[in-house]
Amino acid sequence: MEIELLPPSAGAAVIARITALVNQVYAESEKGLWLGSTDRTSTDEVAGFVRAGEIAVAFVDGDVAGSVRVQRLDAATGEFGMLAADPARRGLGIGRELVRFAERASRDVGCREMQLELLVPREWTHPAKKFLAEWYDRLGYRVTHRADLAEDYPHLAPSLATPCDFLVYRKDLA
Ligand SMILES: CC(C)(COP(=O)(O)OP(=O)(O)OC[C@H]1O[C@@H](n2cnc3c(N)ncnc32)[C@H](O)[C@@H]1OP(=O)(O)O)[C@@H](O)C(=O)NCCC(=O)NCCS
């Protein structure tokens, strides 16, 4: 497996593949949370992240096997999001290596903390979210903020199929 930050000049084919992968995996991991379309992203949005140098991709035998968005929130804080691994290649360490890559990239530019956000249903347990919460805990992330999504992002409230909490996790990179 090779992980690399996509160059701003990356072509339309790889952008389309990342978009499809993210939407495919989020359709499953956010099942039941949203009304209507569950698309997490679009080729336009991913192309913008690529131009900003924020998309890292895991290639296996030349194929896109996973991706993550890495950004800098402020001088001391990095964030990763839109983490996705090919369902046909789960459990091979692609997710773990993408998180490691994001943490290393953030540390290299001077960040001392890493952040991620997780959306969870408030009144029931979503198996994919339970897995993620336990996995992020094993990776050293702790919840530092919990809010009602509809309060923090009122424009999203009409799209929610169920009340959701918005969790912010942080990890010390030192
Ligand atoms: C989260 C995700 C990227 C992990 O990808 P992955 O390549 O399978 O990750 P890894 O192979 O590194 O495995 C992650 C952990 O899951 C465990 N695991 C993997 N497959 C498993 C399985 N079938 N059953 C139980 N545990 C499993 C691994 O042991 C590992 O735990 P460890 O690091 O403590 O050993 C992937 O599940 C995914 O794309 N999910 C949908 C999108 C999503 O929810 N993104 C995050 C939004 S915040």
Image: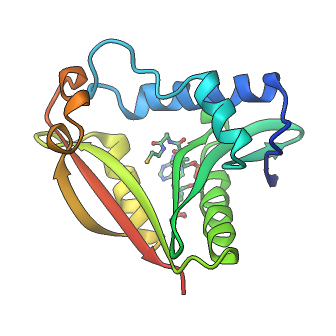
Please say if 81 is above or below 97. above
Residue 57 seen: yes
Q: Residue 44 is drawn in which quadrant? A: top right
Q: Nearer the viewer, residue 138 or 121?
A: 121
Residue at (70% x, 76% y) in the render: 108
The x and y percentages for residue 149 are 21, 42
Q: Residue furthest right?
A: 62
Q: Nearer the viewer, residue 166 or 109?
A: 109
Residue at (27% x, 39% y) in the render: 126
Residue 141 seen: no
The x and y percentages for residue 65 are 72, 39
Please indicate whether residue 9 sits to the left or right of residue 152 in the image. Answer: right
Colouring of the image: rainbow
Q: Residue furthest top?
A: 36
Residue at (43% x, 58% y) in the render: 116
Please indicate whether residue 122 sits to the left or right of residue 54 in the image. Answer: left
Q: Residue 24 is drawn in which quadrant? A: top right
The x and y percentages for residue 2 are 83, 53
Please indicate whether residue 60 sits to the left or right of residue 52 in the image. Answer: right
The x and y percentages for residue 165 are 20, 46
Count all numbered tags in the image, as a single digit: 0
Residue at (13% x, 35% y) in the render: 163
Q: Nearer the viewer, residue 61 or 174?
A: 174
Specify the quadrant that holds the C terminus: bottom right
Please say if 104 is above or below 29. below
